[in-house]
Image: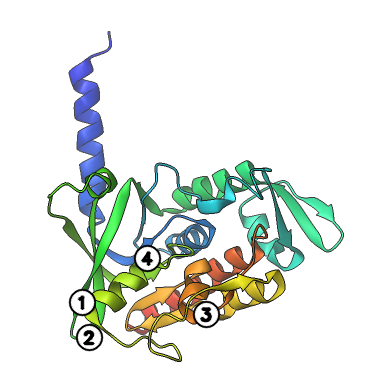
């Protein structure tokens, strides 16, 4: 016999055990697109305590829909090592691989979760914690609370490092600049703004622009191009995967430095 009360208790008990355990982490990743998931996968696999906070119901960002809702995505050949780690079926098309976007996205979510990344969906990051001119955490609330403009106070997650993987808007970096009036590690000290479509340059710059942009605060994926003034690239995703991997390498090194 199914016990309704027990079902509710088990959901609440296990969620809040997980949630409480991840209020203090090594890395807080904001945004569950491909670059954030890749970074989280490898960091968690290496034993770091990592939480990813995604505003939407489903992580995955723009990868689910491929190009214009044709659910195929294109990746460059230099992503092969990452693609092997995520065990997706590849169609070899000369200079590129073509992958089913639903399979690729679901594999990113599944494999990163199995590696130890804790994913919290339907949570919006509304602010950063800033102390001694250094980012040391994020401020979160339920997305429906923010969507409905309810006057409900958020709570804090403490983190050694924060990774902005919020895509084109670079939402968290924008909040940091606007509220703290700090100077970023960009040419102007501000957000440079994303340039128009240029897939060749955009793919290259997505990786190049993946870096620390303020003390203990990093950017990857399209957020990196938005912050540093790179081009967008459209429905080719190799740069996103490589950006997430580069973010992992940088964060791993900085965390081990202490």
Distance in Å between CA atoms under marks 4 and 1:
16 Å
For marks 4 and 3 on the same chain, the one whose residue lies earlier in the sequence: 4
Distance in Å between CA atoms under marks 4 and 3:
15 Å
Q: Which mark is residue 180?
A: none
Q: Are marks 3 and 2 in contact (CB under 8 Å)?
A: no
Residue found at the very far top of the displayed protein: 1
Q: Which residue is mark 2?
A: 133
For marks 1 and 3 on the same chain, the one whose residue lies earlier in the sequence: 1
Q: Which residue is mark 1?
A: 130
Distance in Å between CA atoms under marks 2 and 4:
19 Å
Q: Which residue is mark 3?
A: 229
241 is higher (above) or lower (below) than 4: below
Distance in Å between CA atoms under marks 1 and 3:
25 Å
Q: Which residue is mark 4?
A: 171
* Foreground tag (2 vs 4): 4
User: Badge 4, how many Cα within 10 Å: few under 14, some, many 20+?
Assistant: many
Distance in Å between CA atoms under marks 3 and 2:
24 Å
């Amino acid at each position: 016999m199914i016990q309704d009360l027990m079902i509710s208790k088990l959901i609440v008990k296990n969620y809040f055990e997980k949630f409480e355990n991840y209020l203090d982490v090594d890395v807080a990743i904001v945004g569950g697109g491909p670059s954030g998931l890749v970074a989280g996968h490898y960091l968690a696999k290496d034993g770091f305590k990592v939480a990813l906070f995604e505003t939407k119901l489903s992580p995955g960002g723009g990868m689910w829909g491929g190009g214009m809702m044709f659910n195929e995505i294109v990746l460059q050949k230099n992503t092969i090592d990452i693609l092997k780690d995520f065990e997706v079926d590849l169609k070899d098309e000369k200079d590129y691989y073509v992958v089913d976007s639903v399979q690729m996205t679901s594999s990113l979510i599944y494999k990163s979760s199995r590696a130890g990344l804790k994913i919290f969906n339907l949570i919006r990051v509304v602010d950063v914690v800033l102390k001694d001119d250094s980012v040391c955490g994020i401020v979160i609330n339920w997305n429906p609370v923010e969507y409905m403009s309810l006057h409900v106070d958020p709570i804090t997650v403490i983190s050694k490092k924060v990774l902005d993987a919020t895509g084109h808007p670079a939402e968290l970096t924008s909040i940091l600049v606007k509220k703290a009036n700090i100077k970023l590690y960009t040419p102007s000290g501000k957000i440079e703004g994303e340039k128009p479509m240029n897939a060749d340059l955009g793919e290259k710059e997505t990786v190049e622009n993946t870096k620390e942009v303020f003390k203990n605060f990093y950017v990857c994926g399209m957020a990196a191009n938005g912050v540093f003034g790179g081009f967008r690239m459209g429905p080719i995703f190799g740069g996103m995967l490589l950006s997430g991997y580069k973010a992992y390498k940088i964060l791993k090194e900085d965390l081990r430095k202490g």
